[in-house]
Amino acid sequence: MADYKRAKWAAWADNIRSLDDPAHNFEKPEALDDLVVIDLSSRSMAGCFCSSMLAELGAETIRIEPPGGDLVRTYSPNGIMVKDTGLAYLQEGRNKYHITLNLEAEEGRDILKSLVAQADVLIETYPAGTMDKWGIGYEALSEINPRLIFASISTFGQFGPESKRKQYDYDNVSQARSSIQYATGEVLPEGKTVKDVPYAVPTKAGPWIAWAVSGTFAAMGILAALYHRDMTGEGQALDVSTPEAYGRLNDYQLMWYGEAGVINERFGSLDTALWLYGFYPTKDGGVFLGGLRLEMWKAFVDMMGKYDEWKAEEWTTLAPFMKKDWQLKYQAMIDPLTAQYTSEELTKKSVEYAKSGRLAPITPVVAEIVSPWKAMQDENWLDRGMFTPVQDPVYGSVLCAQAQWKATETPPRTKWACRPIGYDNGFIYLKYFGYGPVKLKELGGKGVI
């Protein structure tokens, strides 16, 4: 019997796991553990998302809320609250120290100035000009601390015709203003109106995607600004507009209009830049089908038993299949074929075709569209630590997505899930100001904290 030879990929998988397995994250240093970040997010998850990324990398992140707590704590399905916190904020309160401070009070603003003098980064999401009106805008705070990185996230940005609108940053506003949602949703059939097909309207993304994108770009900008500060000693202000940030994901659609004057209309799950590329029904839900080369599209047709009937042998280019009428035509022909199988059956069918099909090893990509429950039971994500519960001393066992990337030397980690309103007042005010219980009681009595 021949000796069994282990696949090279398996050896690599074992090697890289030994280096970046998230189970060993707490044994390694944190990349940003010498930074102090102040998170002044107000009503917006964009700032919270940004500071979460920095906190996961070890920055001492101080989340400042008004004495009654920030509105984001109430964002939760069906109004569900865990202690004083909604489910959404249990995700984005991670690794942060939570204190209260009333910025509308002069004494509260004075305390913030003293804290800024000891900080590296400040994140705020107030309408443009609000911080400046309070005397704690970038110009004022940079005089106190010239090395400060001051990151503002807002809907319309810090300048521009609409920047003076005193509107807080709302995810759905940013989705709408980005132009992405215009082309997101089911196609309106020819000759029909929205009254006939009420579901064929622009569709919001399920999660708060615009907030997440602007928060991510803000974090990236902060890291770049910190690098610049290391080189020059200079701090700086960052201005992130949430619709601009989300609009950055608009791939070819803006270019298509800019170059050819074509407006990309809603097209369901299809895409005129790619084929085969879309979601299709199955007995138990649906699958994504991908065949970005002509051979893969032919392999799918063959796999479904239609190679000869559809005369796939005569196809020489994918170009015709990029046209909307062709895509709609073939979508209508594919739907009843995939609907004969379960998602698992179609996936296995593709794997088997890669072994013995007419065009093997070429095969189409088939991926089941899974529910959140199924994703959280997926062995691959469980093995990689994505859904390992956080054992929080206040909220107990909390299941939140974590370990968004792995790293061999300075990996991110979730140390705790969240904190109640003002939970860390005692620790933070003592550490940075020397305030003890008597002083905190006095400040609380005046409504400053």
Image: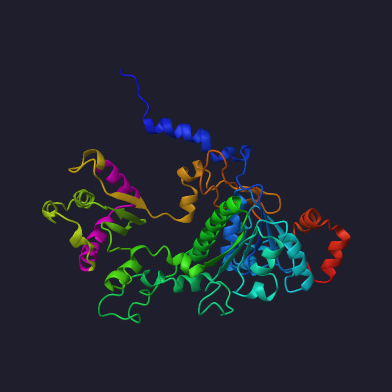
Seen at 73% across and 59% down, the residue is: 117
Placement of the N terminus among the 4 image quadrants: top left
Q: Position of residue 293 (x, y in %)?
A: 24, 51
Residue 252 placed where, x, y %? 33, 64
Q: Can you name the residue that lies furthest to the right here?
A: 438
Identify which residue, 93 or 312, lies in the foreground.
Answer: 93
Quadrant of image for the C terminus:
bottom right
Question: Principal SS element in the magenta part?
Answer: helix
Residue 327 is a magenta residue = yes
In front here: 263 or 235?
235
Q: Residue at the location (66% across, 72% down)?
A: 131
Q: For the magenta stretch, what is the residue range?
A: 325-353
Relative to 188, does residue 304 appear above or below in the rendering?
Answer: above
Task: Measuring from the top left, give residue 441's x and y in whole percent.
Answer: 86, 64
Quarter occupied by residue 45: bottom right
Q: Is residue 367 above or below residue 116?
A: above
Q: As displayed, is residue 351 above or below residue 156?
A: above
**Please, which residue is most extreme toward the top here?**
1
Q: Position of residue 122 (x, y in %)?
A: 64, 61
